[in-house]
Image (cartoon, helix red, strand yellow):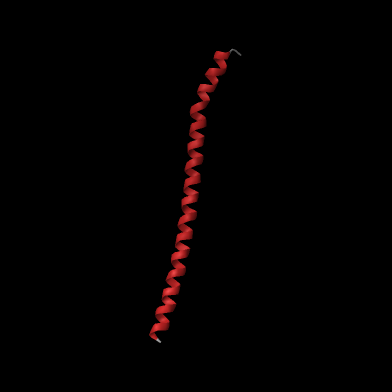
Amino acid sequence: MTSINVFGIFLTLIPIILSIAAIIFIIWFALTLIKTLQEKNRILSEISNELKKTNHQDKL
């Protein structure tokens, strides 16, 4: 192989590598977002339950 062929092969692989990297980043971002939103919902649910308990005790 000459250096021109190696360079040509490398140039053809760059878009593939960038596409794979973009897909991996999107999947990572989506999973992180889902995990964060689930944690947020859990915390809000706990707060809601505590408020319901407090309101129920105040009425008694």
Quadrant of the rendered image containing residue 7: top right
In this view, 53 is above or below 2: below
30 or 58, nearer to the observer: 58
Task: Give residue 20's position: percent from left, percent from top.
Answer: 51, 35
The residue lying at 50 percent from left, 49 percent from top is 31
47 or 41, nearer to the observer: 47
In this view, 22 is above or below 33: above
46 left or right of 6 in image? left
Outermost residue, bottom side: 60
Q: Quadrant of the C terminus?
A: bottom left
8 left or right of 1 in image? left
In this view, 23 is above or below 46: above
The residue lying at 47 percent from left, 55 percent from top is 36
Outermost residue, top side: 2
The residue lying at 45 percent from left, 62 percent from top is 41
Task: Give residue 34's position: percent from left, percent from top.
Answer: 47, 53
The residue lying at 47 percent from left, 42 percent from top is 26
Q: Quadrant of the N terminus?
A: top right
Task: Give residue 24's position: percent from left, percent from top.
Answer: 51, 40
Outermost residue, right side: 1
Task: Give residue 58's position: percent from left, percent from top.
Answer: 39, 83
- How many callouts does the rendering have? 0
